[in-house]
Image (tube, helix red, strand yellow):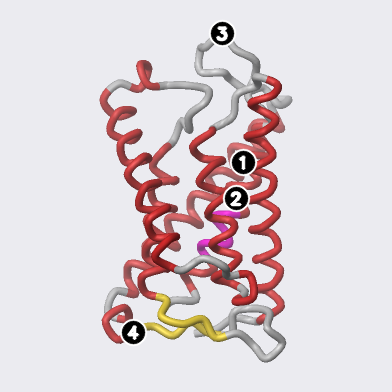
Amino acid sequence: MGGPGWLAGILAAVMLTVAVYCAGRLVVARRTGRPTEVDADGVHVFMGVAMAGMLTAGLKFLPAGTWEAVFALGAAWFGWRLVRVRRNAQATASPWRCLHPLPHLVECGAMLYMLAVAVTVVSKSTGTGMAAMTLSATAQRFSIVALALAVFMLGYTVWLGDRVAATALAGGTTTTTGHACPPRLAPRCAALCKIAMGVTMGYMLVMLL
């Protein structure tokens, strides 16, 4: 199943923008000392670049195997973080680590799924956009996985949007998890990046159904 090339092109541009912005957050956080979710921002840099290449063939510059290794490491990291948070949330809470590792674990899993099942990406004659994703017969049997991942990601974006709206109504009040440190770096912008990432990933997963 394919989507319009212009939409894929727009989403690819958004993903590259998110990647550049998250890379900038890491630089600014290091220079100013204002904390950010280093692990989440870091993995979103790689995800943004990889997803842009999957949406628009002209932006692809690394083989799938390389990206699979990157996101396998990401899944291992967030899986380990999830276990530690579930065991002792207070001891592992840090303004420099993501407070909710589960969504990022699912994101890494979704990237691994898409990289594994997307055999080819057929672009339109203009060279922009994802006209179709051709799946192997084996992958088509597991389309329920794509559906489950898409539902999770879209639900996650709704939850994030609700939190952003609630923060805005509360006058932008944020917490620092009890640590004596400056407030987090642009938390609403970080949430908007996660929303953009979740919507785009949900769209790509739906295209695999």
Picture coordinates of residue 151 (x, y %)?
43, 60
Q: CA distance from mark 4 to mark 3?
A: 52 Å
**Is residue 129 toward the left or the right of residue 71 in the image?**
right
Residue of label 3: 180
Which amino acid type is shown beneath numbered disc 3? Ala
Q: Are marks 2 and 4 in contact (CB under 8 Å)?
A: no
Q: Is residue 197 visible?
A: yes
Which amino acid type is shown beneath numbered disc 2? Ile
Q: Nearer the viewer, residue 68 or 147?
A: 68
| Magenta region | 197-202
Picture coordinates of residue 50 (x, y %)?
54, 61
Residue of label 2: 195
Q: Is residue 111 visible?
A: no
Q: Main secondary structure of the magenta part?
A: helix
Vertical position of residue 174 compared to residue 26: above or below: above
Residue of label 4: 136
Q: Are marks 4 and 1 in contact (CB under 8 Å)?
A: no
Which amino acid type is shown beneath numbered disc 4? Ser
Callout 3: few (<14), some (14-19), or many (20+) C-alpha neighbours within 10 Å? Answer: few
Q: Are marks 2 and 1 in contact (CB under 8 Å)?
A: yes
